[in-house]
Image (spheres, rainbow, N blue to C red):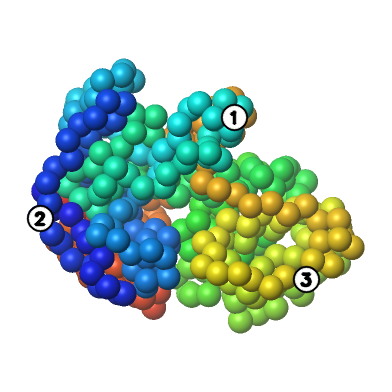
Amino acid sequence: MKAAVFTGPEQIAIRQVDVPEIRPGHVLVDVQACGICGSDLHAYYGEWDQRDVAHGHEFAGVVAEVGEGVEHVRPGDRVCVECFSHCGDCVYCKTGLYNLCLNRRFDAEGHGGFAEYSLVEGKAVFPIPDDMSFEQACLVEPLAVGHRAFHLTEAGGSDTVVVLGAGTIGLCTLAAAVAEGVRQTLITAKHDHQAEMAAALGADHVVRTSDDIRQVVKERTDDLGADAVVDTVALQETVAEALDLPRRKGRVVLVGGFTGPREVDLGKVIHGELIVTGSCCYGYTGMEKGFQTCIGLVHGGQLGLERLITHRYALEEIAEGFRISADKTSGAIKVMICR
């Protein structure tokens, strides 16, 4: 089969490799589409580990084969896939926090969605409706990340929520907040196409990164501060903003991909009694897995997330897909690799 391989910083190529052999508890997926994520770009730049694969985790396809013990899907089923595996037996799995599993692994069993076939654990595979496109299904994964980050803010109908960053995760977090019906949403955007997309998704206020977000939040909250802030960027300046923008007793959720330590003024946390937490992937939202909830949200169409897909490339064109995804002046938001 064909599979993408990182060959160096900002270098990715297609190689011919063996199709994975089925194993107990696993599912072999015939990949039909996979989105390029910001975390994929970290690996592309060499900021994160580069190995002999380019995984790809925002993917969907058709079940080709199921291993012993897998009963909820069968060959021919259309599915999308969580980005990590969990054991189901540790204390976190048993208490519903399977995203914090002590044996959690973020890799597929070898190649992920940037290959023709991917072997994944059965627990990570979710059936999708027959009338849901594979591209739609690829949006479930980033939406689930933003959906969890938003819900960790505990914001409701009377609250003001600020999202720092209008990349895919920021826009998905915004969409979750809009769907929940919070009182007002603000989001920062660096590029014109990101600002336009944020407005299209229902943001009440789009603030350009060249403007003073601190002043805008003061004006929109009568100097009180936001009830909740979600940082999806993870830069030094956005972490500082995240601690500056909330009201006292406000919540800060960090969901960006950190590539190194950040210096923060913890005095702001203490003096404002801020509640600061991280958000890792997705788990349960109430009685249902967030991933399952987001399948319904994407399928329902009320969020309009399909408009996030700006570019499409074949697997053989993945090098160009990564180049475009890395170049935000291209207008790229979600670049999709399609069969």
Residue type, mark 1 in image? Val
* Side (left or right) of 63 relative to 199: left
Is residue 228 or residue 38 the one in the foreground? 38
Give me the residue at 42% from left, 60% from top.
Answer: 39
| First-in-chain label (3 vs 2) | 2
Residue 250 image-quadrant placement: bottom right
Residue ID for mark 2: 16
Residue type, mark 3 in image? Asp
Give me the residue at 61% from left, 69% from top.
Answer: 261
Residue at the bottom extreme, as displayed: 210
Residue ID for mark 1: 91
Does the image show residue 188? no
The relative height of residue 15 versus residue 183 in the rendered view (above or below) is below
Is residue 73 or residue 43 the one in the foreground? 43
Q: How far is mark 1 from mark 3, CA to CA?
A: 33 Å
Picture coordinates of residue 307, whole percent (x, y): 39, 55
Q: Residues within 10 Å of mark 2 (few under 14, many from 20)?
A: few
The relative height of residue 287 versus residue 157 in the rendered view (above or below) is above
Residue ID for mark 3: 265
| First-in-chain label (1 vs 3) | 1
Image depth: mark 1 or mark 3 in front: 1
